[in-house]
């Protein structure tokens, strides 16, 4: 282990590697986030960009300064030489500007200049924007980030409750908690009556993304209502997920982006009541990620049979790993 090779150091090292491989600058310094290594990879879709923003936000709360970059160059030895981040790391404002290239109406398209809009991906963008608002220091009642979150929520809300999922419940409840607006609570209630994961009916071979979001939604319902059964349900859903993923190396073979969704929401439970198993499983997974999945020559997490998101470049899963290391360093929920 290199000196200072803790969770935060690993998060920052992984971020620097992602930045060096997949973030380019064009004329005038415009930031481009690519869906893989180099300028031949193609610009990334909205979903990986949302994950990059989520990772940047979690790194930002580890640092008192507004910049994402660490105060000192990150040093790690590769093939006998010291590697350092080669270019200036983007700020949250730059990532926000990049996000606006995907703007389509009140929401965001899958790619810049297209009109295909994913409700699930827009939900994630809105959650990122709301987290950015909550991390502003000093706290403010309104901000451009909050405006983005509320505006994007309208795209999600327009779909009707039967076309939304637990992540939409999370978004509505977080907006209600941040603003006190009852409409958000009303919409969350409508969706919740349709979309609930049964603890006893979790698929043995797969714990899907909605399962992880359901854990977070239950914790947020507890925050709103103080109904203890909601928190108990969150704990039970989390335990069921970990039980299903414990066999046959399923956790390892799942895409890191899916595991990030799960663990971020499991840590939301931990923020209310200590969950030693969650911390232990996260530690075990991330230690294996660093030791077996990471190629020390490139910094890419593609080795050791680790899962990956199908039909994507590496940006989505790499950014998810950055977020998990950042959450391991500071597991308290930022909002």
Image (cartoon, rainbow, N blue to C red):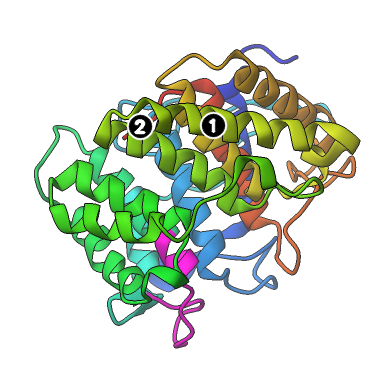
Identify whether 158 is placed above or below 332.
below
Q: Nearer the viewer, residue 121 or 293?
A: 121
Task: Decide whether residue 183 is among the magenta residues.
Answer: no
Placement of the C terminus among the 4 image quadrants? top left
Residue picked out by circle 2: 334
Earlier sequence position, callout 2 versus callout 1: 1
Residue at 42% in and 39% down: 218
Please, what secondary structure does the residue beneath circle 2 have? loop
Circle 2 packing at 10 Å, graded few (<14), some (14-19), many (20+), is some
Residue picked out by circle 1: 266
Residue at 65% in and 49% down: 258
Q: Quadrant of residue 126?
A: bottom left
Q: Provide the residue span drawn in magenta.
A: 108-123
Task: Decide whether residue 110 is among the magenta residues.
Answer: yes
Please, what secondary structure does the residue beneath circle 1 have? helix
Q: Nearer the viewer, residue 26 or 3?
A: 3
Give the x, y percent position of residue 249: 87, 36
Q: Is residue 171 visible?
A: yes
Give the x, y percent position of residue 95: 39, 57
Q: Nearer the viewer, residue 281 or 190?
A: 190
User: In whole angstroms, how far apart are the C-alphas of marks 2 and 1?
Assistant: 14 Å
Residue at 46% in and 53% down: 166
Identify whether 314 is placed above or below 122.
above
Identify whether 167 is placed above or below 8.
below
Look at the magenta stretch and give its main secondary structure: loop
Placement of the N terminus among the 4 image quadrants? top right
């Amino acid at each position: 282990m290199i000196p200072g090779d803790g969770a935060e150091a690993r998060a920052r090292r992984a971020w620097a590697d992602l930045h060096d491989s997949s973030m380019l600058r064009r004329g005038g310094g415009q930031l481009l986030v690519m869906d893989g290594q180099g300028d031949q990879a193609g610009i990334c879709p909205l979903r990986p960009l949302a994950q990059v923003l989520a990772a940047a936000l979690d790194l930002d709360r580890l640092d008192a300064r507004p910049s994402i970059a660490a105060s000192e160059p990150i040093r790690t030895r590769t093939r006998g030489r010291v590697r350092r981040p080669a270019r200036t790391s983007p700020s949250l404002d730059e990532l926000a500007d990049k996000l606006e290239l995907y703007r389509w109406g009140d929401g965001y398209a899958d790619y810049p200049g297209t009109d295909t809009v994913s409700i699930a991906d827009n939900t994630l963008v809105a959650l990122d924007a709301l987290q950015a608002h909550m991390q502003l220091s000093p706290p403010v009642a309104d901000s451009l980030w909050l405006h983005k979150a509320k505006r994007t929520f309208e795209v999600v809300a327009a779909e009707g409750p039967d076309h939304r999922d637990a992540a939409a419940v999370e978004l509505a409840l977080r907006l209600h908690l941040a603003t006190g607006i009852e409409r958000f609570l009303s919409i969350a209630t409508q969706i919740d009556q349709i979309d609930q994961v049964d603890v006893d009916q979790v698929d043995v071979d797969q714990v899907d993304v909605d399962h992880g979001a359901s854990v977070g939604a239950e914790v947020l319902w507890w925050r709103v209502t103080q109904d203890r059964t909601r928190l108990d349900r969150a704990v039970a859903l989390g335990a069921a997920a970990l039980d299903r993923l414990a066999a046959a190396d399923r956790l390892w073979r799942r895409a890191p982006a899916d595991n990030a969704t799960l663990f971020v929401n499991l840590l939301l439970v931990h923020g209310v009541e200590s969950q030693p198993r969650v911390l232990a499983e996260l530690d075990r997974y991330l230690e294996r990620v660093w030791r077996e999945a990471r190629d020390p020559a490139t910094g890419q997490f593609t080795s050791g049979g680790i899962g990956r998101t199908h039909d994507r470049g590496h940006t989505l899963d790499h950014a998810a790993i950055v977020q998990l290391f950042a959450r391991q360093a500071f597991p308290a929920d930022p909002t």
